[in-house]
Image (tube, rainbow, N blue to C red):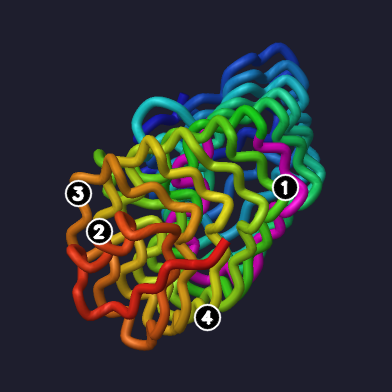
Amino acid sequence: MFYSCKALTNVDISNFNTSNVTSLANMFSYCSKLTNINVSNFNTSNVTNMRGTFAGCSGLISLDVSNWDTSKVTTFGGGAWESGMFYNCSKLTTLDVSNWNTSKVTDFRSMFNSCYKLEKIDVSSWDTSSATNLNSMFLDCQLLTTIDASNWNTSKVVNISGTFQGCSSLTKLNLSNWDVSKVTNVYEESQRVSTFGHCSKLETLDISGWNISLVKDYRSMFIGCSSLTKIDVTGFDTSLATTMTYMFAGCSSLSELDLSSFDFSKITSYKNAFQNMNKLSMLYVKDQASKDFINKVDSGINCVIKEA
């Protein structure tokens, strides 16, 4: 309706009757000069599509959508990566979506992508049982210090590329309960984003319960996680993997790395997989073939075959 009204500074929609509306896709997209939009009384009970509703509203400083009924919504993202619901709402510092019903949502793509100043978001009670795509969901949310997604149901999710990349203020993240058995994407070539890339303050990352096995490209998965002191990837089944380029590059605080569950037999791309791991003193593998591979990648690594 107001798509790309870039000169619009004020809009009165207080009397809008939205009770029969099924799509709010791109309604205010790229209204970049709007600082406030009063949509608190919108009746969204029949809305199924909220893709890009506020995308590119880079002037917004406040937004009240706390009472929106999202029980029928199936998509917050989709299409191009810059079409997430709140994509590049770069001046928003707070956003209350804590009570949203997300049980039917399949696509969370780029939902909060580039919300650079967002300091707090409560998504702890969200029902993600229908979710299939979390690509770039929190990409470059640089001021978020916590994201509680520990109880999310991710059993249908296939794409987690860029989900937390650039969340450079996060210090801990507990995703140990995530079911990643259907995940195929941890890296997105078109955006050059990976799941945890450049989470530079992340000290604790619990993915110990991950049963990941369908991924072929692990490129840059943990690149730039320079504060990580420990990571458990012993549940990883890499028998289909072909690419590990830059996978652990810049994990400069890791002193030990256990890759004893890793199968390197199909790996063809491995450039700088362990670049700038300055404190790494021990890397464990399962057999001699794996040790030979590690030595080919970086002969300076102290690689040891782990006893069964």
First along the sequence among labels 3 and 1: 1
Label 4–label 2 contact, CB within 8 A: no
Circle 2 sits on which residue? 293
- Position of 60 relative to 166 (above/below): above
Q: Nearer the viewer, residue 271 or 26?
A: 271
Q: Alpha-carbon distance for marks 3 and 4?
A: 26 Å
Question: Considering the numbered disc 4 on the image, is that residue within a helix, a strand or a loop?
Answer: loop
The residue located at (28%, 44%) in the rendering is: 191
Circle 3 sits on which residue? 269
Circle 1 sits on which residue? 97
Label 3–label 4 contact, CB within 8 A: no
- Position of 41 relative to 202 (above/below): above
Q: Alpha-carbon distance for marks 4 and 2?
A: 24 Å
First along the sequence among labels 3 and 4: 4
Say if residue 33 shows up in the picture. no
Q: Is residue 146 magenta?
A: yes
Question: Considering the numbered disc 2 on the image, is that residue within a helix, a strand or a loop?
Answer: helix
Q: Alpha-carbon distance for marks 2 and 3?
A: 12 Å
Q: Is residue 253 left or right of residue 20?
A: left
Residue depth check, mark 2 versus mark 3: number of the one nearer the observer:
2
Q: Is residue 66 left or right of residue 12?
A: right
Residue 265 in which image quadrant: top left
Q: Which residues are magenta?
A: 133-154
The residue located at (46%, 71%) in the rendering is: 257
Q: Nearer the viewer, residue 259 or 49?
A: 259
Mark linked to residue 229: 4
Q: Position of residue 298 (x, y in %)?
A: 21, 71
Question: Considering the numbered disc 1 on the image, is that residue within a helix, a strand or a loop?
Answer: loop
Look at the image and tell me in which quarter the C terminus lies.
bottom right
Q: Alpha-carbon distance for marks 2 and 1?
A: 47 Å
Q: How busy is the neighbourhood of tag 2: few (under 14 within 10 Å), some, or many (20 plus)?
A: some
